[in-house]
Amino acid sequence: MKVVNKYLNVRIYPAKVDKNDNGEKIVTINEIESNIGIYRFIYNKELEFINHFRQLLIQNGYQDKFIVNDTSCNIILNMLMQEYPFLRKAESSSRQQSFRDLKNAFKRYKNPNLKSNYPVFKSKKNKNDTFRIMKTNNNLRIQKDKNAFYKILIPKFGLIKFKTSKKYRQMLIQASDPNDPTATIKHITIKKTNNKYYAIFNIKTIHIPQREYGPLMQVGIDIGCSKLAVLSNTQEIPNLDLTKETDKIIKYQRKMKQHQQKSIRYQQAKRLYHKWMDKLVNKRNDYYDKQTLYIAKNSCFVAVQNENIKAWKTNKYLSHNLQLNAPRIFMDKLEYKCHWNDVEFIKVPMDFPSTQICSNCSKKNPHISGLGNLQIRDWDCPECGKHHDRDVNASKNILQKGLQTVGTTVQ
């Protein structure tokens, strides 16, 4: 058993009025939109103040040593609340979370290993508008309304209708019970995407690792473009066929260009565009979840090369497939599933020439390096004469490099 944080995404349905027929306070669309706007307003105002203060330091000959921490951000927030009284309409923990996110953005920017850009202002045109509410004293939970229907109780806002499966509803009810130590709700993130509203629960719970009976494998995985992944046991995971979804997305994108914005036909095309975009993302996530769970259940050691996906996207012949299939999402899902199921997961450095080394004699073949030689899918080793499939050979080298990193040998 292992204590993990699970994210549970459920669809919510805010109302247009603030009370239902039984007189209970319910969450409205205006309240959610207002809280999203206040979260963005606080973030932008604090960033504007920090930028102005840093410029003053530089202009007056001082070094730029302004520290962005909870104390400095909280002082700025108190000043903003005195100047803008409407900020008190938002839930208190969501106001504090806005400057915590700004503080983390500066922390990532100053970390030389992450290479993050300087924090920028949040835009109203952002497709994913969010705000986060922390749980304190059981103020965030699942409870029944007067008609005995389960609803989400959001502090300061009221009850809100949600839909999910029976399994996940039972998990939320269990996490809402203060007497149950096996699961606890940590916080909730309200997100607006494609004119739909979602609640993302962070649940701290006990996870029981899933294992298949029989011998477990040590596997190296080569992430590719034409194929999603190739395993060192010669098993291939093909890319998902998303032709139907992409054709529909392109069709409605063209229809949106043919009509004026805010017209009826433009809104109809936009709604259908969002529908097929959601279908594509959900289909891909479901496929990746099944494939990564299969690998995690049947393995005891997994090695993956930490590929530079951003550099791949600069190639015009690869960028479309990379954006469509999103191999980074596959790698991230595989990593946390291995962590949940107690499988050792190793990332091989991206500068390791896995495709150029012969897995039989360990000699390097420089004639297949570079983007210009990507069309070479199989080759013969000039030293030992062994015939290699490019992807299978790379996955075997990744496995050997991963095992050398932890100091073991292939089983």
Image: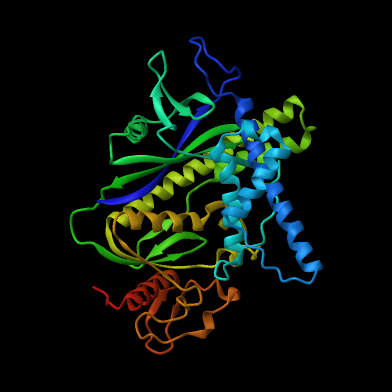
Farthest left residue? 214
Q: Nearer the viewer, residue 243 or 170?
A: 170
- Give the left or right position of residue 8, taking residue 129 as reference: left
Q: Quadrant of the C terminus?
A: bottom left
Indicate left or right for 313 with 391 as reference: right
Residue 240 % position (x, y): 47, 50
In this rendering, the answer to whether 250 lies above or below 68 is above
- Residue 304 location in percent, x, y? 41, 67
Q: Is residue 169 visible?
A: yes
Report whether residue 126 is seen: no
Residue closer to the observer: 182 or 369? 182
The percent coordinates of residue 344 (x first, y second) are 32, 64
Position of 84 with respect to 159 (left or right) is: right
Q: Is residue 206 or residue 354 the one in the foreground?
A: 206
Q: Residue furthest top?
A: 21
Count of labels in the image = 0
Colour scheme in use: rainbow
Residue pictured at 60% horizontal, 30% vertical? 32
Q: x, y percentage for residue 174? A: 31, 33
Q: Quadrant of residue 93?
A: top right
Q: Is residue 329 above or below residue 115?
A: above
Q: Which quadrant of the figure has residue 318?
A: bottom right
> Measuring 32% from the left and 40% from the top, which residue is drawn there?
183
